[in-house]
Every structure is written in structure tokens, then in C-alpha cells.
Image (cartoon, rainbow, N blue to C red):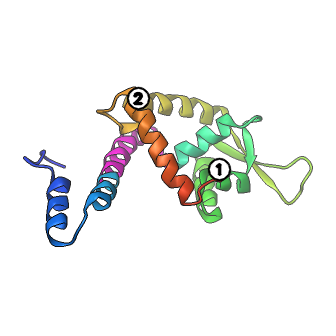
Amino acid sequence: MNRPLPFDPIARAAQLWEDRIGPAGTMAAVTGVMRVQQIIQSAVDGALKPHGLTFARYEALVLLTFSRNARLPMRVMGERLQLHPTSVTNIVDRLERDGLVKRVPHPTDRRTTLVEITEEGRALRETATAAVTGIDFGLTGLTGRQVEQLTELLTKVRKSAGDFTS
């Protein structure tokens, strides 16, 4: 976006919706969430691009870092990242091509391949994390308490949609 508008277009759309269609609360909230998602995505992409990462690739490196042995089966990666197996394969292919992860055989299950983060992957994850935390993941303008409240609200929507059960 080049310049800020002199008015809030979502508030204006909500007023028009209210006048012409009916209650606009949900429409305004969803439109706001969608716009904020664009803002956050742009900020995070901008922070990760100099490191040669997309958010999906960054998330995969973080997930591997969080795992007990710095490696996971691809199936588990897909479940935890909530991605289709094809997407996980594409992410791992790119990370492997860049030397950030490697595929290793599972020690007890020949049918399973593990993805393991390399030292290069750990180092890049660390510098990329500094970049995204340096911009607060693009979520600016909120207090710490407001971020907690937002997370609580979004968690309710995710749970209601079936993202998780507990």
C-alpha cells in the first residue's frame, strides 16, 4: 500500500453493509482479520526473504528445532504444520536442496523417512527468528495483553473449526 487512506475502508464498508444488507459486525470482523493477515504476511515475508525463506519453510525449521531429536517423520511434520503431505514434501525438498535439512532413514521402521535439521538449518533458523521477532511478526500496534486476548479469541475460532480438540 502506497499511502494511508483518509478513512477506514472496512468501517465504511460495514456502514454501507448495515444500511443496505443488515448487521455488519461479523462481516467487518472477518474483513479486518483478512486485511491484518495480509499486513502480517507482507511483514513476515519481508523479514524472511533476505534469508531465502518463506514462512512455511521457516515454520518447518522451527518445528524440527522444537522436536526432541531435531528430526521428525514427514507425516508428523504435516500433522503439526497442518499441511497436505504434498506441501510438506515440497517444503522439505527445497530445504534439503539448500542444505538446511536432510532425509534420514528411520532406525526401526524402513517405511518411514525422517527429516533432520542440519547445522546450517539451525543457524539460519536462529538468524531468521531474530528477523521475525525484530518486527514482532508484523503484529504491531497492540499491547502484550491485547496480543494475549487476540490469541485467545483466534484460538476459540480455530477450535470451533476443528483444528484441535483439547
Q: Secondary structure at mark 2?
A: helix
Left or right position of 119 against 9: right
Q: Is residue 137 above or below residue 114?
A: above
Magenta segment range?
35-55
Residue 29 position in % (x across, y down): 31, 54
Residue lying at 39% horizontally and 41% vertically, measured from the top left: 44
Q: Secondary structure at mark 1?
A: helix
Q: Amino acid at mark 2?
A: Arg
Residue lying at 49% horizontally and 54% vertically, measured from the top left: 157
Location of residue 17 by image quarter? bottom left
Residue lying at 40% horizontally and 29% vertically, measured from the top left: 145
Question: For the residues marked 2 and 1, what is the alpha-carbon distance in whole angstroms?
Answer: 27 Å
Does residue 43 show up magenta in the picture?
yes
Residue 50 position in % (x across, y down): 40, 38
Residue 114 appears in the picture as rendered: yes
Residue 32 position in % (x across, y down): 29, 52
Give the residue furthest to the bottom: 21
Which residue bears the numbered disc 1?
A: 80
Q: Earlier in the sequence, mark 2 or mark 1?
A: 1
Residue lying at 20% horizontally and 72% vertically, measured from the top left: 21
Give the residue furthest to the right: 108
Does residue 6 show up magenta in the picture?
no
Q: Nearer the viewer, residue 165 or 133?
A: 165
Residue 54 appears in the picture as rendered: no
Q: Amino acid at mark 1?
A: Arg
Which residue bears the numbered disc 2?
A: 145
Circle 2: is it few (<14), some (14-19), or many (20+) Cα within 10 Å? few
Q: Nearer the viewer, residue 148 or 20?
A: 20
Left or right position of 43 against 129: left
Left or right position of 39 against 108: left
